Amino acid sequence: MKKGWLISGVIVVLAGGLIAFGMSNGKNVATSNSGSVTEQELYQKLKKTPEGKQTFANMMIKKVLEKDYNKDVDQKDLDQQYDKAKKQYGDSFESTLAQSGMTTETYRDNLYLSALEKAAFKDNQHFSNKDLKQAYKTYTPNVKVSVIKTDSEDDAKSVIDDLNNGKDFAQEAKDKSTDTTSKDKGGKLDAFDSTVDATVVSSEIQKAAFGLKKGNYTKTPVKVAANASTGATGDSYYIVKLNDRDAKGSFQSLKGKMKDVLVDQKLAKDSTAMQSFIGQQLDKAKVNISDKDLKDALTSYTQAAQTKK
């Protein structure tokens, strides 16, 4: 399966060096025999860059939303997301972040800002009981599956024959799977539910997994077509085994989760919904930018809010 980057939707902060924002004195940040660089000089340069403007925008959005919604951000969940990404990328974690212009600190900031925005947006959405019940009806809770990936239908059929003849699924995965991220674990994937993104677990594998009984595997190959968004350059054929599934709780116990599901669906359908919402919050907070070079830093948000009116 694809190594999914775990900051989907996060506004990336590239200008980690913008510590000079707001510093207007002449303190040097560097000296040399040829001259010095002051905080003010650095500030004047950085604030005019796209990265500098985005950093300022993120700082302002954080200020506006934190007062009312900081309490709704689950720090334990953020820590888990961070640890999962770190584990997934291993020794290349920091270098992968660097390629996106981030450090571990700015990555944590991104996770927090994204969660803060989502919490604020969710708190301002109102769904009918009917909508929530419909979401509950179509929701499938976490399943734990193992997969064996092959590069041809014939190879997949051969593996299925082996399994039908009593071969161990985990051993077959280690011996024959071409999925480098799961084969050494006997084909085991991280648990997922029906809200998982198709770029992380393909819709074909989801459908196959949700339709299986515990302990069963697919008796025909599951074709996953080439897809640039997942990094799959050719068709693949999977055998999927359901190891376990969570029991589906009552509607009342999952009502909050269903609101999350509907919020995610709303954001997925409308790419400007979050921008518009943030623009509205900035307007309510009466944000006034006095620096002429940063006047347009929040324009994309305020214009989106105006368009929605």
Image (cartoon, rainbow, N blue to C red):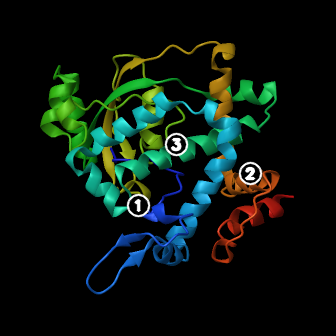
For the question of whether residue 264 can be seen, the reply is no
Q: Is 38 positioned to the left or the right of 217 in the image? A: right
Q: Is 245 positioned to the left or the right of 233 in the image? A: right
Question: Looking at this view, is 211 or 274 the one in front?
Answer: 274
**What kind of residue is marked 3?**
Tyr
Which-is-in-front pick, marks 3 and 1?
A: 3
| Residue for badge 3 | 112
Instruction: Name the residue located 34 percent from the left edge and 55 percent from the top edge.
Output: 97
| Residue for badge 1 | 228
Which-is-in-front pick, marks 2 and 3?
A: 3
Label 1 – label 2 distance at C-alpha:
31 Å
Question: Where, by quadrant of the figure, is residue 192 drawn?
Answer: top left
Label 3 – label 1 distance at C-alpha:
29 Å
Question: Where, by quadrant of the figure, is residue 118 drawn?
Answer: top right
Question: Where, by quadrant of the figure, is residue 189 drawn?
Answer: top left
Instruction: Name the residue located 35 percent from the left edge and 42 percent from the top edge.
Output: 85
Label 2 – label 3 distance at C-alpha:
18 Å
